[in-house]
Image (cartoon, helix red, strand yellow):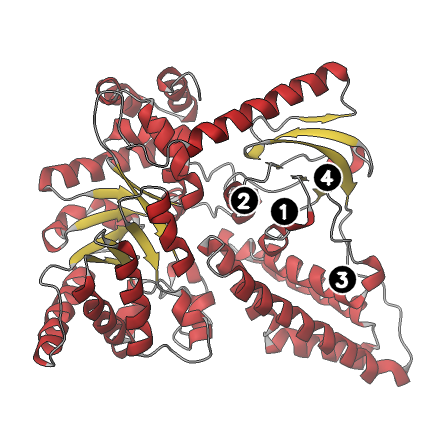
């Protein structure tokens, strides 16, 4: 399956998976302490690599990649995992590599017994961490950094590794596993790195040094291309280059349909590096500023002044365009690093996260609200609440806002009279019962990544259920249509800020459903703008009933083919 657009021609570099030793060979008793030290040095090196990578890439990666780096760091910090490895080396006199293999087998058996798909799929993260430790323990087996012009063929690739490939000259990636909506696939698209996933026989049928063409659109892999196939590849590359040149011309163009309807395009951001993109790409403002990175940078929580300065700088950078701050959206895996999350949650995806965590920590939440409200004195500010599930949460925040606004004004701070309050729709209960709290909010933002996951009971990072994680599902379209209709009736703007907002192939579908405001990653804005400019909104609106009558994915795909501009 093609997971990231683009075509690449290069020599294959086939990388077989580095598996832990599973034998029971023993080391000499005199080597035990040295082997434990060697393991700890590898763990410390892996921790340092994660910290340096996160620092170097801060602001240049989607938030999901930061989540993966944080999760892998937490695994490396797990005292139970390290204690178990030390015990295996001491009591059984296993080598460090062998101890990793034995412990991996034990944990894999536990993961397989878990009923919850989300938790069961976390074995992939454990494998990525163990694989990194094995490379550090066995430098002679460590894969090379890559040679310019190579296409990497591997079993799977972690986001932390993928994000470094373009700098080494790797021109494409083929994996035997993976899915179209994994974190690595999302990252590859933002890097414009061609990626093909699900090539199950690639490790057996391809060999290093072999010349390949890969197509990240169709998923086609062409080994040993002949003259005609090379000619077709050159034509494809020229066509892609032409498309990129056309996209660059759209920076100063309006996001306007053929029949004259203007569509608002806002940017998702998580650092100051993203602010300049708003002006460079002609976006209408910040549709989603992720504030949680401030809570993950150090060992202590950021104080009010630190947060205020960050938020104020964002508002000033917008120069009158709105800045939408999402309150800290910390899940159990991330919040624990900030000292906020409850420990030992059985299912973090369904636990104390988002607005639930904020309301459970009122002092921390009030500090953030004070900082955001103070920033509102410098320009238009909107506050977005993540993981809302019902009226009670919105009402509680609305009351806190009023109280803090009065306190700040009494203290002499300039606070805007109009700080728009929004709810992020990620939970099915909020989507179905939005009429119960729409009188309390000023705008809605639909987080389709989590909404699809919860609605269809399918973790998007679990390859075993990747076929079920499908945004082209009638249930999602019906829910989006209801949300957009409810917002229109209440005259409340509704945006979509999930991954599908940045997929230009789905733009006609979203416009037909009634979406008029997109919030997306900077790397996808121009493609979406191009798609908007090729759409006739009147025709798409007239075709909406046919779209909502589709009974399955095939029916929705047929609708898309019939209503997608020819250039797509």
Residue at the disc numbered 4? 149
Residue at image position (63%, 36%) is 198
On the image, the x and y values in percent for residue 98 come to 80, 67
C-alpha distance separating marks 2 and 1: 8 Å
Sequence-wise, the earlier of marks 2 and 3 is 3
> Label for residue 191?
2
Query: Hey, which quadrant is residue 3 in on the image?
Result: top right
Residue beneath disc 3:
135
Q: Earlier in the sequence, mark 3 or mark 4?
A: 3
Crowd around label 1: few <14 · some 14–19 · many ≥20 (10 Å):
some
Separation of disc 1 and disc 4 at Cα?
10 Å
Mark 1 secondary-structure assignment: helix
Q: Residues within 10 Å of mark 2 (few under 14, many from 20)?
A: some
| Residue at mark 1 | 166
In the displayed structure, does residue 325 sit left or right of residue 251?
Answer: left
The answer to which of marks 2 and 1 sits earlier in the sequence is 1
């Amino acid at each position: 399956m093609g997971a990231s657009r683009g075509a690449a021609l290069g020599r294959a570099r086939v990388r077989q998976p580095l598996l832990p030793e599973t034998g029971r060979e023993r080391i000499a008793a005199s080597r035990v302490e040295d082997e434990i030290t060697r393991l700890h040095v590898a763990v410390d090196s892996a921790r340092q690599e994660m910290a340096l990578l996160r620092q170097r890439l801060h602001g240049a990666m989607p938030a999901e990649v930061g989540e993966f780096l944080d999760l892998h760091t937490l695994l490396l910090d797990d005292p139970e995992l390290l204690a178990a490895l030390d015990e295996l080396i001491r009591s059984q006199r296993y080598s460090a590599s062998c101890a990793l293999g034995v412990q991996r087998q034990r944990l894999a058996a536990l993961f397989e017994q878990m009923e919850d798909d989300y938790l069961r799929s976390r074995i992939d993260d454990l494998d990525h961490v163990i694989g990194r430790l094995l490379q550090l323990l066995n430098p002679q087996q460590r894969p090379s950094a890559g040679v310019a012009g190579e296409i990497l063929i591997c079993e799977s690739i972690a986001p932390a590794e993928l994000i470094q490939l373009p700098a080494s000259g790797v021109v494409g990636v083929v994996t035997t596993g993976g899915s179209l909506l994994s974190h690595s696939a999302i990252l590859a698209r933002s890097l414009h790195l061609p990626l093909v996933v699900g090539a199950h026989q690639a490790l057996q049928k391809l060999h290093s040094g072999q010349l390949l063409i890969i197509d990240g659109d169709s998923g086609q892999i062409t080994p040993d291309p002949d003259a005609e196939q090379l000619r077709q590849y050159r034509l494809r590359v020229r066509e892609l280059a032409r498309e990129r040149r056309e996209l660059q011309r759209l920076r100063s163009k309006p996001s306007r349909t053929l029949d004259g309807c203007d569509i608002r395009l806002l940017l998702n951001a998580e650092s100051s590096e993203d602010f300049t993109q708003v002006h460079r790409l002609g976006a209408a403002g910040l549709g989603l500023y992720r504030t949680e990175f401030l809570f993950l940078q150090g060992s202590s929580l950021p104080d009010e002044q630190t947060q205020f300065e960050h938020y104020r700088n964002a508002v000033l950078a917008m120069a009158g365009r709105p800045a939408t701050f999402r309150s800290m959206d910390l899940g159990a895996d991330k919040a624990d690093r900030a000292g906020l999350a409850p420990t030992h949650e059985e299912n973090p995806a369904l636990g104390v996260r988002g607005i639930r965590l904020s309301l459970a920590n009122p002092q921390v939440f009030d500090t953030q609200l004070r900082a955001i409200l103070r920033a509102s004195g410098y320009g238009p500010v909107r506050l977005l609440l993540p993981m809302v599930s019902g009226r009670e949460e919105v009402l509680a925040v609305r009351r806190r806002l009023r109280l803090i606004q009065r306190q700040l004004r009494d203290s002499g701070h300039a606070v805007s009279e109009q700080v728009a309050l929004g709810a992020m729709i990620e939970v099915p209960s909020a989507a179905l019962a939005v009429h119960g709290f729409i009188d309390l909010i000023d705008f809605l933002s639909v987080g389709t990544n989590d909404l699809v996951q919860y609605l269809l009971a399918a973790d998007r990072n679990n390859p075993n259920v990747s076929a079920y994680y499908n945004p082209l599902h009638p249930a999602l379209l019906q829910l989006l249509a209801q949300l957009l209709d409810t917002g229109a009736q209440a005259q409340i703007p509704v945006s979509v800020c999930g991954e599908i907002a940045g997929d230009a192939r789905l733009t006609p579908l979203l416009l037909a459903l009634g979406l008029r405001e997109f919030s997306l990653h900077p790397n996808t804005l121009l493609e979406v703008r191009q798609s908007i400019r090729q759409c006739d909104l009147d025709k798409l609106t007239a075709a909406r009933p046919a779209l909502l009558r589709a009974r399955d994915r095939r029916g929705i795909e047929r609708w898309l083919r019939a209503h997608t501009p020819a250039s797509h």
